[in-house]
Amino acid sequence: MDIILRTQHLKKHFGSVRAVEDVSFSVRRGEIFGFLGPNGAGKTTTISMILGLTYPTAGTVEMLGERVTPGHTGVLCRVGTLVGAPALMLSYSARRNLEALARLYPDVTAARIDEMLEQMDLKAAAHRSVKTFSTGMKMRLGLALALLNRPELLILDEPTNGMDPAGMHEIRTLLRSLADQGTTILLSSHLLHEVEQTCDRVTVIQRGNIIAQGIVKELLSSENVVRVRTSMLEQSAQALKDLAEATDIRTEPEYVEVRGVSSEQVLTFLVARGLAPREVFVSRPDLESIFLELTQKTA
């Protein structure tokens, strides 16, 4: 397994404020890795330590096989970053912004600049002043700058802030395309639907601590909820307590809710006890409901 980024027990304290308490995760080559948490959870502070902008109180960062600290950042020439709103020269055109950055990279040619303008759908606006750009266009230009030197790793912190749904969809589609072409992406976000629709794996952080990690599809499939509509709510709920592996049995106004078992198990069990339900259906939770449950447990 090719690990392209690894953090181990990162901590960052500002006096008595424990912004990051214990963060360890690894990002594999070619994946989109989600770093998820509410505002104030410690995501941006962690990103700052990963990029060598802030000394950690404790812990280490290893990127592309090299340790990263504020005094050792040479490996970052192989990394593209976009943290918050892109820093653009607003009086310049999109092309001139790219040309200015290209002076730092001897291998970046005019053809590469044309390629990025095309890929980010900015070719028609290449000679327009950036101050006339929409938020989505500025973000796409920021991504073009981050990708200009063909980085092996792309680190993004809240890349769709302030964007409308259409712009967010454009960025999600673009990130998936980049990953399919071999770019590894670390995506830090508090937007649950963004992570759910984009990422392969995710780490959830709350109050500076990791509270969950895993493959997104597995996180979403592991908590299916079976709901039973019946005229005998109390009797069914009581009976289901005897069903092996059934957990978290709840009685709602119109149905009984049970976790840990399949709908077939529930139906067979109730019918055998003369409690045939009117309807049995499965509710698949989204990442938002799982996230809320996780963060409420640690609140």
Image (cartoon, grey):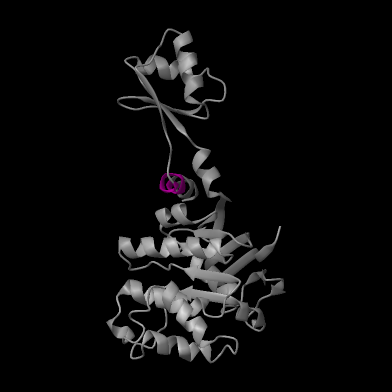
Q: Give 147 or 158, whichever is nearer the viewer.
A: 147
Q: Which residue: 30% across, 79% down?
A: 133
The secondary structure that dominates the magenta segment is helix
Residue 236 located left or right of residue 44: left
Q: Position of residue 61 (x, y in %)?
A: 66, 70
Q: Position of residue 188 (x, y in %)?
A: 49, 64
Q: Position of residue 21 (x, y in %)?
A: 58, 63
Residue 183, image quadrant: bottom right
Kindly tell me whether residue 84 is visible in this rendering: no
Kindly tell me whether residue 190 is visible in this rendering: yes
In the picture as drawn, the residue positioned furthest to the left comes out as 132
Residue 24, image quadrant: bottom right
Q: Which residue: 56% across, 58% down?
A: 209
Q: Position of residue 122 (x, y in %)?
A: 37, 77
Magenta-colored stretch includes residue 291: yes
Check the picture and name the quadrant holding the N terminus: bottom right
Q: Give 274 or 170, whichever is nearer the viewer.
A: 170
Against 273, residue 228 (above or below) is below
Q: Give 116 or 230, whichever is nearer the viewer.
A: 116
Residue 218 located left or right of residue 72: left
Magenta-colored stretch includes residue 46: no
Magenta region, residue range? 287-292
